[in-house]
Amino acid sequence: MGSGLELSVFYEKLIIQDLTPPYRGFSPADGHIMPTFQYKARDSAGKLIDGTMEADSKEEIVDKLSAKGCMATKITEASKSVESSTGAKPESIFDRLQRIKTQDIIMFNIQLANMINAGITLLETLEILIEQIENKKFKKIVSKVYYDIQAGNSFSQALEKHPKVFSKLFVSLVKAGEASGKLPGTLTRFSEYLEDQEELRRKINEALFYPIMLLCAAVLVTLYLTASVIPQFVKIFIQAGVPVPFATLVLYKIGLAIRQYWYVLILVVILIFLGIRYYIHTENGRLNFDRLKLKMPVTGILYRKVIISKFARTLGSLLESGVPILECLDLVKDVVGNVVFVRIIAHTHNSIEKGGTLADNLKSSGEFPIDTVQMIAVGEETGDLSTMLEKISSVYETSIKFAVKKMTMILEQILLLVIGLVVLVIMLSLILPIFNMIKVIKH
């Protein structure tokens, strides 16, 4: 008994020696930072055990193991093991600024689903993926997920610790997949969902790119002509004694003001931008701004279709994965991105909790088209709401493609018309004084 105690003390001294400050991660309990350690130990029967544990130091790990009747034989810092196994180097400032793209999450899910379907365990799959991930920031997060699972947490619990990377929607889907035993299918479905949303976002951005560039170019050209060209011509007209039309004088004054007080103009623009941004971040401001976006003449229809498509696709995917309807509605609120629809979904949640139906609440809101509400009502009656929602989303995604093309054509025509009118006003402001100069010369 005495020799066993001496041996335990010997091992404790051996492990505690040469301690180095460990890499530290945040501890949610008290806000300070705690590292994760890997350990090997012998239990009271002499059996070898291993695992991971969070603590402030190696000494604390030894104390915790001793309290369980185990004798530590080896303790290493988990974060260092990740670096050695993945070949990761110390994080630089560029690594910290590196962004985790949607494409990284999509590829992660696809590979994860395929490997698990092939019979590879979750931990083995994550270990392989850690080696393959090129994004250093994402690699580090997946490594933390790996060690959390190894420490006894479920996959969803490990993902939940990184809300900036793995959304609540994804965590809920994984949790449902774990409960139903259909995790690979859930991961594949979420990958398809992300791909659809990314494709939709890309098409809208591409459609808006040309009109925005055209508008910026028009503004810059107009500022240049007003601030540089027109003042030079007006000076010539005044020196020649040519009467200057009122429109030309107005543009001349505007040009002089821009040249003399350009910094004031920039300051005013910045203040207006900050004021609008502050107002939008208030509760009433955000509500009014979201209502305005829905009522815009050209973009409002497209914006509404995008929201309804997201609503249907997200709700359908969650229901298909086995997530309860009330939890689904809570998650969908975070996806739609519009306060008007968030309030409708919150009211629907409360109504369904009291025995109401989804279709009736959406119909009473007045924000969902009648045909969409009717399809949802049929889905509820037949008990196949998830399939009906998927069909609604597919219909809207097809409609959005045509709406984007139509919106692009309309915006281009409007911008060209506006630019043409601006150029016409500027040209007339220059040409009319020239005609007056010709009359003066003739006399």
Image: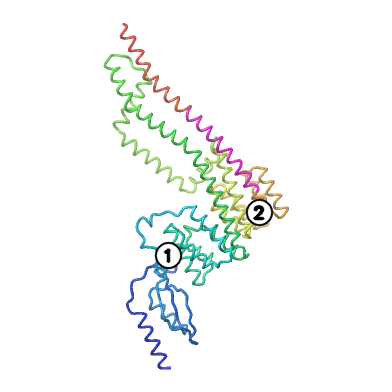
Q: Position of residue 236 (x, y in %)?
A: 28, 18
Tell me the quarter of the image containing the C terminus. top left
Name of the residue lying farthest toward the top: 443
Q: Within 10 angstroms of label 1, few (less than 14), some, or many (20 or more) residues?
A: many
Marks 2/1: CA–CA distance: 41 Å
The residues colored magenta run 391-416
Residue at position x 34%, y 21% in the image: 249
* Numbered badge on residue 386: 2
Query: Which kind of residue does numbered mark 2 sit on?
Result: Ser
Mark 1 element type: helix
On screen, 296 above or below 235?
below
Q: Within 10 angstroms of label 2, few (less than 14), some, or many (20 or more) residues?
A: many
Residue at position x 48%, y 84% in the image: 43
Mark 2 element type: helix
Tell me the quarter of the image containing the N terminus. bottom left
Residue at position x 37%, y 86% in the image: 10
Mark 2 / mark 1, whichever is N-terminal: 1
Q: Nearer the viewer, mark 2 or mark 1?
A: 1
Q: Quadrant of residue 4?
A: bottom left
Query: Which kind of residue does numbered mark 1 sit on?
Result: Thr
The residue labelled by disc 1 is 86
As rendered, which of 118 and 12 lies closer to the eye? 118
Query: Does the magenta-highlighted stretch encompass residue 341?
Result: no
The figure's colour scheme reads: rainbow
Q: Position of residue 298 (x, y in %)?
A: 54, 35
* SS assignment for the magenta stretch, majority: helix
